[in-house]
Image: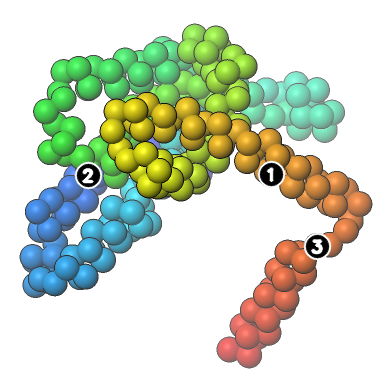
Amino acid sequence: FAQRSLGFCMASLCGCWALSLLPQLFLHDNQLANWVGCKDVGCTTAIFVAIKGGALGYIHVFVAGVAASRVFALTCMCWCPDASCAGGSGKGCFALDSAGTPLLLRFGCCFGYGLYLAGILLTPFLIDDYHIFFHNGGMLPVMLLILLGAAAGSDPIAVWAFRSKPMLLLGRISYNQYLLQSVVHGWVVTSFGWDSTAKALYLPLLMVVAYITQRWVERPYSDYQRWRQAKGIKGCDDRCIEVVDVRCAVRCACC
């Protein structure tokens, strides 16, 4: 996509969104398993997991991300010949072009969240029947509008909401929430069941656990890694990677 036109990238995004229908077609009522003659539970489960939860079901989403980055470069950025913006190199650089950004992307977060709310309010009957479609790429228009709108930097939601301290904190612990959601959910179900009280407890507890792990596990380890890198100290992980790289290089040379 590095040299592709805006029209080509937009057509690619539309095609990737259309491909989101394939997981829905393949997995709804185990259609793909029936087509290949797969009847036992293990086989159908393997197909379901491979497509819905594996990389195979998200190739089009990855391609859409690449195309979206090209769209952002073509619509929201411009060449700045000013030497100072390139650190004094005199070669210039690309910079955000807020004035030239299309209205749809300038307010991308507003449009994206508006489209999301409209979908929930106007078509709630589609959520259950087309769950796999929405899960495996059907939300691409919404997510691309939000991501590009936030990256453009002039959207009111991005300026006033996403840069607030509570949202910055949620951003820091978001990955920990993703990693720990199943663990915390399992503990809540085992300890309290899954009634209304447990459901109300789950999200606050997940946020607390995510904050604790980010503050006293992830951050100290990240600080230690930066200190080690600044001092030129190699750890066990670096040495293991070196051993693997050497063995792979030797094996490739033998082949």
The amino acid marked with disc number 1 is Val
Q: Residue at x 46, y 43 (%)?
A: 184
Q: Residue at x 23, y 17 (%)?
A: 118
Find disc 2 in the rendering and name its residue: 132
Horizontal side of residue 4 vs 41, given as left or right: right
Label 2 packing within 10 angstroms: few (<14), some (14-19), many (20+):
many
Label 3 packing within 10 angstroms: few (<14), some (14-19), many (20+):
few
> Residue 217 has which mark?
1
The amino acid marked with disc number 2 is Ile
> Residue 235 has which mark?
3
Horizontal side of residue 85 vs 152, given as left or right: right
Spatial separation of the CA atoms under disc 2 and disc 1: 35 Å
Q: Depth check: 92 or 10 in front?
A: 10
Q: Depth check: 98 or 248 in front?
A: 248
Q: Residue at x 28, y 41 (%)?
A: 135
Q: How far from the left and from the top, in percent, is residue 103? A: 41, 12
Quarter where residue 175 is shown: top right
